[in-house]
Amino acid sequence: MELLSRESQALAGILLISLVTVESGGLYLLKIVRGRAEVTPFQLAFARAGHAHAGVLLLLALLCQPYVDATGLTGATEWFARSGVAVAALLMPGGFFFSSMGQGRTAPNRFIVMVFAGAALLAASLLTLGIGLLA
């Protein structure tokens, strides 16, 4: 009996390796908090938000993998349920980081749209997985 499908094993491996990038991002956050990087209060808030979203969403994407295997989803809906949270884990933190880049920035730039796109993708993929589990 297979514990995880090959697809879940592959994505889980990628997600676990990706968590190392969140860890290294934590070093940058420590640099900010210790006063070794000049940022505005807005940039500090967005760095914290991006870091937190990255870690939580990668863990959520890992958690989703065995549940996708437990559904009867196939094809595009299976792929969407399996990878949507993982892609949201790139979009949302990326939106926080990219929209706050630049010396002295005090408001987000147009990259903030990535946060909203990631949130929509997250909701849609979780709804697909939830419905797949209930069906």
Image (cartoon, rainbow, N blue to C red):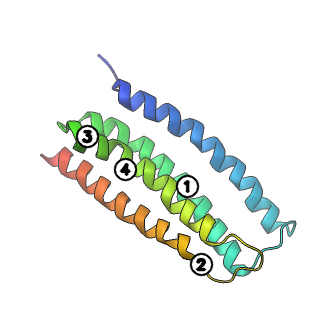
Whether residue 39 is situated above or below residue 21 in the rendered picture: below
Q: Amino acid at mark 2?
A: Pro
How far apart marks 2 and 3 lie (CA) works out to 34 Å
Q: Is residue 10 left or right of residue 98?
A: left
> Quick one: label 2 or label 3, which is nearer the N terminus?
3
Seen as rendered, the residue at the extreme top is 1
The residue that label 3 is drawn on is: 78
Residue at position x 59%, y 36% in the image: 17
Q: Is residue 80 left or right of residue 36?
A: left
> Quick one: label 2 or label 4, which is nearer the N terminus?
4
Whether residue 100 is situated above or below residue 90 in the rendered picture: below
How far apart marks 1 and 2 lie (CA) works out to 18 Å
The residue that label 4 is drawn on is: 84
Q: Nearer the viewer, residue 128 or 108?
A: 108
| Labels 1 and 4 touching (C-beta < 8 A) | no
| Labels 1 and 2 touching (C-beta < 8 A) | no
Q: Amino acid at mark 1?
A: Ala
**Label drawn at residue 20:** none
Q: Secondary structure at mark 3?
A: helix
> Quick one: label 4 or label 3, which is nearer the N terminus?
3
Q: Nearer the viewer, mark 1 or mark 4?
A: 4
Q: Amino acid at mark 3?
A: Glu
Within 10 angstroms of label 3, few (less than 14), some, or many (20 or more) residues? Answer: some
Q: Nearer the viewer, residue 32 or 90?
A: 90
Q: Amino acid at mark 4?
A: Gly
> Quick one: label 3 or label 1, which is nearer the N terminus?
1
Rendering coords of residue 51 (x, y %): 62, 59
The residue that label 1 is drawn on is: 54
Q: Secondary structure at mark 4?
A: helix
The residue that label 2 is drawn on is: 108
Q: Secondary structure at mark 2?
A: loop
